[in-house]
Each structure stands twice: as C-alpha cells, then as structure tokens.
Amino acid sequence: MADKLTRREMIRALTTGGLFTAGSMTPLAALFAQQLGPAVRGPQPPEPALPKAPATLIDGKVVQPVRELPVLRKTRILVVGGGPAGTAAALAAQRQGVEVTMVERYGHLGGLATGGLVLAIFPIYNRDGKQVIRGIGEEMMQRLDKLKFGIVDRNKPPLYPVVDAEAFKYVLADMTLQSGMHAYLNCWGVDAIIDDSGAVRGAVFESKSGRQAILADIVIDASGDGDIYAAAGAAFTKVKDNIGLVSRMGNMDEVDMTGGAEAEHASTEPVRKRPTHGAPVTQLDGKLGSQTPAPRVNWLNMKGPVADGLDVAELTSLELKHRIALWQNLEKVRQKPGHEDAFLLETAPQMGVRLTRLLDGVQILTEDMMKNGTTFKDVIGYSGAFANVAEFQIPYGALVPKKTENVLVAGRCIAADFAVANITRLIPVCWVTGEAAGIAATLCVQDQCTPRNVDIAKLQNILRQTGVYLG
C-alpha cells in the first residue's frame, strides 16, 4: 500500500492554503472586511427588544399565538434551497440583472453534491456520448478543472466526472459571493407567505436570529422536499424512497464499487464505467468504495432502506444506525491485508434523502414520455442517458404548479412520476431545472407576468445563449 497518512495529515493535504482565495485571488483580509465590516470583540450594547409570543400550554394543547414577524429583507426573486438546483437558479437569475436572495438550511452550498458526498456527476451524456447537460453546471465543472484534486474523468464518456466535495463547496461559495446576490446559510424555510388570493409572496425562515420573513415577487422552491409549495397548498404526491448516508475513507488504493465491468486491458488504475448505485447498508461487509479526485481517498455510496424522508423520527433512527454501520464497515476494511491503516475521513453531514414530494404540475413528466422520447414545445433542457433509458426532454410545465401562483419549482421535487423522478433527482438534471427556473423567474419580474404565462420562446432563447442544450 502507498505511504500512510493520518486523518489530520490527509485533511491538511486536501485543504486549500495561502492568504488568498484561489479563484478570485482576493486577499482574505479584504474579503472578510468587505463581508463583515468592523466589529469589537467582547460585550455588545443591548439590541432593541422584540415582541415575544412564545407558545403556551392551554388545556393540554400547545397554542402558538398570532404574532408579527420581522422582515429580513424584500427581494425580487427568492430561492429557497442552495443545493444543485437552488445555486443554479440563483446564479442564473442574478446574471439576468434581477435582485436575488438565496436561503440554505445547511452551512454550505451544494446540497447532496457536497454535504451529501454524492460525488458522481451523472447523467450528462446522451447514448452517443455527447454531453447534453451544459450551462451553469458545465461552468461549475470548468472551475473545478482548475483546482488540484477538484474533479476527475472530465469529457471521458462513458465515464462520469467525480468531484471533490470540499473543492465544490469552495467553488460555489466563490461564485455566490462574486455574483452579488444576497445569501443566508443555516436558515431553514419553514412556511410560505401567501396573499388573499393564495399566491405565494415569500417565505418564513427559522435561524439563530429567530423566525423571520423574506418577501419576494417570485419564489423558487428548490428545497428538495417541496417544503414551500406544500406549505402554500400546492397539490403533490408524497413518495418514499431509499435513504442512505455516504462517507469517505482515507489511505485507500483500491476500489470495489466501480458500477461497471473492468477494462479488457491490464491497468493499475481503477476503472469506472458508471457510478455505483450504492451498496445496501445491510451488505456493508468491508466495502472499499469508489475513487475520488483526492489521492488515496474513496467515497462509499450507501443505499439505505426505504423510509419517509419527511418523518423526523425515521430520519433520526436511520442516521444513528447508518453511522454505526459505517464504522463497522471500516473495522472490516481494516481486517483486509494492506488496509490496516484505513480511516473514516468524513461522514456526510446530511443524509441521502432521494424523494419525498413530487409536484402536481402543469405538465407531469411520465415514464411513458421518458421512454418514448416525447418532445415538448416548452423544452427547457435534457436529462442524459441513464441505465437503459436514453436522454429525454424536460418541459417547462414540470416546474409550474397546476394552480398555485408566483412559485416555480426546481430540483428533485418537480412534476414527474416516481420512475422519472428517479432520474430528474440527479445532480446534473437539477442544474438544468434550476437554471431554467431562475431565468423564468427573471422573465416574470421583467415582463410582469406569472410563471404559467412566461414567454417560452424568450425563455428558450436565453437558455440557448447561456449554453443550455435544447436539442
């Protein structure tokens, strides 16, 4: 086995160092001064007292009284969720010159592509190996190309690119700050704000600053679970799917989860025909995982049991049990000759919840449409070929609720049946629906129209200009 590293040494080797940020080369002192401004360490002057309205216990019932919420900000476009769909939506909208605010529940951007450690970027190619997912997602990968250990297997179909989670977090942070949008992390969207007609006018958030509201002309629900459109009363189908927990292990120089046949010629390099679907958690018997861009670091894609991703009790039970399973797998790995010094480098800070809510949209993308290659006049992008399914078009109508106004949907909770959603939930396809939703939202603002009345020809023209493949 190659030279052994401790966990501390491995993290140090993977961390970007220096006094500058690698992309913009902005001195870090200036960067933090721009964002935070001057501050004095120590006791602070008291802040104005805000009216309190705690929940009370009345006759055994917990009652939350009516209260006025402070408005954190007013914005033209509000993007709820900073995962693949949300970041693509926010960046696309901001580049059209419309004010954007993005809110993310975790302390980083990228969602399951970063915090979930789902590192394989697929499907991006059609059946002939042509890349059909481009636009902002391709730009993100180009930025990763410039970072050491940022991404591997670019432009090598049928291989799919694999990213480094920390490099990707850095790229998204840099793109977000450079864009000029307003962004809030560690801020969880918990409710929709609707007007007398039922149209969505913003969202309510919980954070360390308390419960606050953000008002917006158009809201993009990129929460993954459809939290905002569900709170606003939009119709949806609830589904259950596998929920796993991905991890990374260090001091590895072999893989055993390639997801495809080995190459015919002898090679010392691991071969990945396609990304693994993940080993069932009950079959983690010393799995070594798949290669990542970082030397001697593997990612272990776990496929957990089917569960309810909207049930906090089930989520809690699964997360605790998954962490036990990952450690037991590590102990079995260490029993294999040459892997005695393997270590658990990282467990994902968020579980791999696949699907929970699927929108009842203007157009529901069905399995028959997907398999038959149905074309749409309102096409806003493609999914690449996946498993035995060829590439297929995604219609704009799948991003628009059937009745609820002023909200667009992007990511894994768009309008698709369960079979199609198993593909549209994947990271590059979330880039596609996010970018389309972001640009459509800007047209709503600029043309003073509702999402269902967006000029499709204008939307498609802008998407083509930004590099999106529409066929």
Image: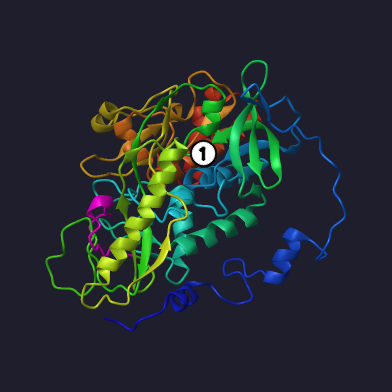
Classify the position of the C terminus by image quarter: top left
Say which of 184 and 273 sits in front.
184
- Left or right: where 213 falls relative to 451: right
Say which of 16 and 51 sits in front.
51
Q: Is residue 274 magenta?
A: yes
Q: Residue at x 48, y 63 (%)?
A: 166
Q: Position of residue 49 (x, y in %)?
A: 84, 41
> In this figure, which residue is indicated by the disc labeled 1?
222
Instruction: Name the main secondary structure of what is drawn in magenta.
Output: loop
Q: Is residue 339 magenta?
A: no
- Left or right: where 275 falls relative to 452: left
Residue placed farthest to the bottom in the image?
A: 3
Q: Position of residue 382 (x, y in %)?
A: 37, 40
Q: Quadrant of residue 33?
A: bottom right
Task: Please tell me whether mark 1 sits on a helix, a strand or a loop.
Answer: loop
Q: Position of residue 459 (x, y in %)?
A: 52, 34
Say which of 127 and 257 sits in front.
257
Classify the position of the N terminus by image quarter: bottom left
Q: State which region is magenta.
A: 273-291
Residue placed farthest to the top in the image?
A: 197
- Left or right: where 284 falls relative to 236: left
**Is residue 411 visible in this depiction of the protein?**
no
Say which of 48 and 432 sits in front.
48
Q: Position of residue 384 (x, y in %)?
A: 32, 44
> Which residue type does callout 1 highlight?
Ala
- Is 113 drawn above or below residue 163 in the view shown? above
